[in-house]
Amino acid sequence: MHHLIIGAGPAAVSAAEQIKKLDARSEVTMLAAEDVPPYSRMAIPYYLVGNIQQEGTYLRKNADHFSNSGISVRHARANGLDAHAKQVSLADGESVAYDKLLIATGATATKPPIPGIDLDGVHNCWSLADAHKIIEKATPGSNVVLMGAGFIGCIILESLAANKVNLTVIEMENRMVSRMTNRTMGTMIKDWCVDQGIKVMTSTKVDRIDQGADSTLSVTTNTGESIPADLVICATGVRSNTAFLDGSGINVDMGIVVGDYMETSLPDVYAAGDVAQGKDFSTGEYYVQAIQPTAVEHGKIAAQSMVSGHISANAGNVNMNVLDTVGLISTSFGMWMGVDGGEESELVDKENFKYLNLQFKDDVLVGASSLGMTQHVGVMRGLIQTASPLGEWKDKLMENPTRLSEAYLAGAQGQHRTAAV
């Protein structure tokens, strides 16, 4: 049985290793589009700041790990799929046959359609190749403009600040990290960054980028301000890598549409990770979460399905984010924005940059977010994922959201007593 995996990120590696555990005799091939060993994009900021070498970004540190595990890594880019013939065509003109196929091609960073976005000196920060270009320019004292203050942008921000550049962040939303914060929390993150000497412009768009005779860039905003830059980094979003599937007949929406077993609309074809529109635990709906823990879990479920059939269904992945922004930790879990008819409990300490928000549906915790308070992270996820009724503890948390650990312990003890009876 030949299992072909298109991709070499966390979902692909997780799936490949799980397949070999379940069926050691199977043949597993991973197609890696980049000419480097499988690596984690989430490790790139640590490489940018010099905390690790390039090898530190690799998902497996032993150079012989995959060959020793019976997994073949082939550096080639897929450019088409013929599901009827069970063939994947490659950019070099060759093709690869498969018995089972996993598409784990991830996502690609996008750039907004503004004048000057393709100039030299304007880069995404998504690949190791991008990182090499940024390292060359992001030196102490250089002027750097970061477009986008979402999750990816704030990860990059951390490393740029550590490199002591003169940093300006431009974000079109009215707060930072808008996909995991409400206005109060996102504004507190902005205030923290400003206190660290970073210029942050929210509710602002880049209109154009120009380049002078000396190669210095100039970023013009919709407010008319012109900002000089030696380097512009674009972190305005990503899109799933599905273009090579045009004409294949596979069902694609925002990503590849999958079922509870990571199966696609084509027989013997599965999808996982940032390319897959998978099930969300909190809503039961299907969308692209684009976070590494989900990618790893997707890979394991897909591998189980490919080897053993549809046995373990995906109950849905909890949408979660943990972010370090220049030393300030923020988190969000589940339906952090709340639900219709729900209630919330909120603690706000702007002076000390501490924030905690709990979202309830009846007496069940369905979402949570925090800033500068890491002691509740595991409990928040646990309560959301178990969907345990809190009973009287819901009212106590409404009065004081910091009593999360007590509520979790009380629930665990109650379940223990019930089981004992």
Image: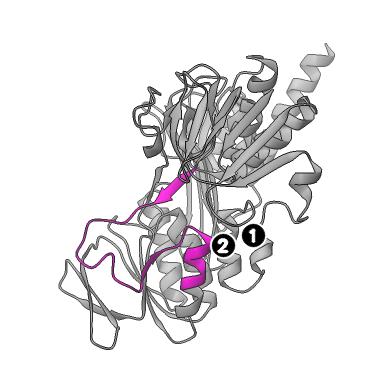
Q: Residue at x 36, y 34 (%)?
A: 254
Task: Name the image colouring.
Answer: one colour
Quick check: 260 above or below 216?
above
Mark closest to the chain's N terminus, 2 or 1? 2
Residue 57 badge? 1
Q: How many marks?
A: 2
Q: Residue at x 42, y 84 (%)?
A: 142
Mark 2 Cα shell of 10 Å, populated few (<14), some (14-19), many (≥20): many
Q: Are marks 2 and 1 in contact (CB under 8 Å)?
A: yes
Task: Residue 348 in the image: state x and y as whole percent.
Answer: 47, 54
Task: Residue 166 in the image: state x and y as whole percent.
Answer: 41, 81
Disc 1 element: helix
Residue type at mark 1 is Thr
The residues colored magenta run 106-133
Of the pair 193 and 42, the residue shown nearer to us: 42
Task: Residue 77 in the image: state x and y as whole percent.
Answer: 49, 45
Disc 2 element: helix
- Residue 380 seen in this snapshot: no
Quick check: 20 above or below 182?
above
Q: Quadrant of residue 43?
A: bottom right
Mark 1 Cα shell of 10 Å, populated few (<14), some (14-19), many (≥20): many
Left or right: residue 420 versus residue 127 is right
Of the pair 351 and 234, the residue shown nearer to us: 234
